[in-house]
Amino acid sequence: QLGWVLTNEKWFPKSRLINYLHVNAGYDISGNDNISNYAARTSFTAVKYRNNAMGAQLTNIGNDKIQWEKTQKLNLGLQAFLLDNRVGVSFDYFLHKTDNLLTLKTFDNPVGGINRYWSNGGKLENSGFEVSVSGKPVVLKDWRVEVGASVGHYKNKVKALPDGDYTSSVYGDNNILTSVGNPVALFYGYKTEGIFSTDAQAKAAGKDGNYLYMENSAGTKFNFQAGDVHFTDLNNDGKIDEKDKTVIGDPNPDIYGNIFATVNYKNLTLNVGFNYSVGNDVYNS
């Protein structure tokens, strides 16, 4: 991390306009090994079967080639105080690139009931900025008032995954999607078009004169009827199933930040702060 206070230099002009100006730049590499201590090792667990027979059950397939994630971080920043230190301004930019992403990889053929194991193979990129402005409209002997606000924006993008798209579950069935070219952990599910008011509407939404339907795990068909949610049949096959799932939301905000105020009267201080986030979707389970 390197920093340079330009206003301390002899050649920098002295004025009431710019009282303090600092620029900084940093680059570092960090690692992450946030998985089980034994994820790299094949392990067995002692189990008791019927009639108290003892045995060993395979509980993990190890990967002795696994290594920690590596994140390269570039940070650039600027801080300034202006107009007799009445106004403060700061700007920060970051670009983070992660490779050897720790991911759960799927076996082509499950071994002993174990279908996944930890591996390296993904890449991720994060970038963003934050700007803040503060001001001191009142600076008196007993009274001081400072107000300010910040706004920030970030975006992340998955650059590579070892097994293509990856889904996981939070309060549902495979409702979180991580895929190449998109942000991490998008909301994944069924689009809706309201409620069927009549059976005729449910039939019209189907194919070849049949009702729009879905099947349970046993293959039993259930026709949609009046009062049911109208899920969008994206592939137009007359059936609602996994093929009709799509991205339905993004938990990442367009902008975020805070608004604050500080009031000082002699030795008494009042701080007020508000945090905000705009443009992010919330999943209603």
Image (spheres, rainbow, N blue to C red):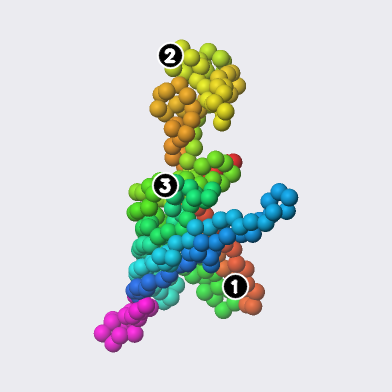
Q: Secondary structure at mark 1?
A: strand
Specify start and end residues of the magenta stretch as a single range.
1-23
Image position, residue 86 (x, y; %): 44, 72
Quadrant of the drawing holding the C terminus: top right
Residue under circle 3?
108
Residue under circle 1?
264
The numbered mark at residue 208 is 2
Q: Residue at x 44, y 49 (%)?
A: 107
Q: Is 5 contained in the magenta span?
A: yes
Of residues 201 and 55, the one nearer the viewer is 55
Image position, residue 257 (x, y; %): 48, 58
For marks 1 and 3 on the same chain, the one whose residue lies earlier in the sequence:
3
Q: Residue at x 38, y 72 (%)?
A: 29
Q: Amino acid at mark 1?
A: Asn
Tell me the CA gap for discs 2 and 3. Answer: 38 Å
Q: Residues within 10 Å of mark 2 (few under 14, many from 20)?
A: few
- Vertical placement of 7 versus 66: above or below? below
Q: Amino acid at mark 3?
A: Asp
Tell me the CA gap for discs 2 and 1. Answer: 74 Å
Quadrant of the drawing holding the N terminus: bottom left
Image position, residue 19 (x, y; %): 38, 78
Q: Nearer the viewer, mark 1 or mark 3?
A: 3
For marks 2 and 3 on the same chain, the one whose residue lies earlier in the sequence:
3
Tell me the CA gap for discs 1 and 3. Answer: 66 Å
Q: Residues within 10 Å of mark 3 (few under 14, many from 20)?
A: few
Q: Is residue 152 something one can see in this rendering?
A: no
Relative to residue 268, is residue 182 drawn left or right?
left
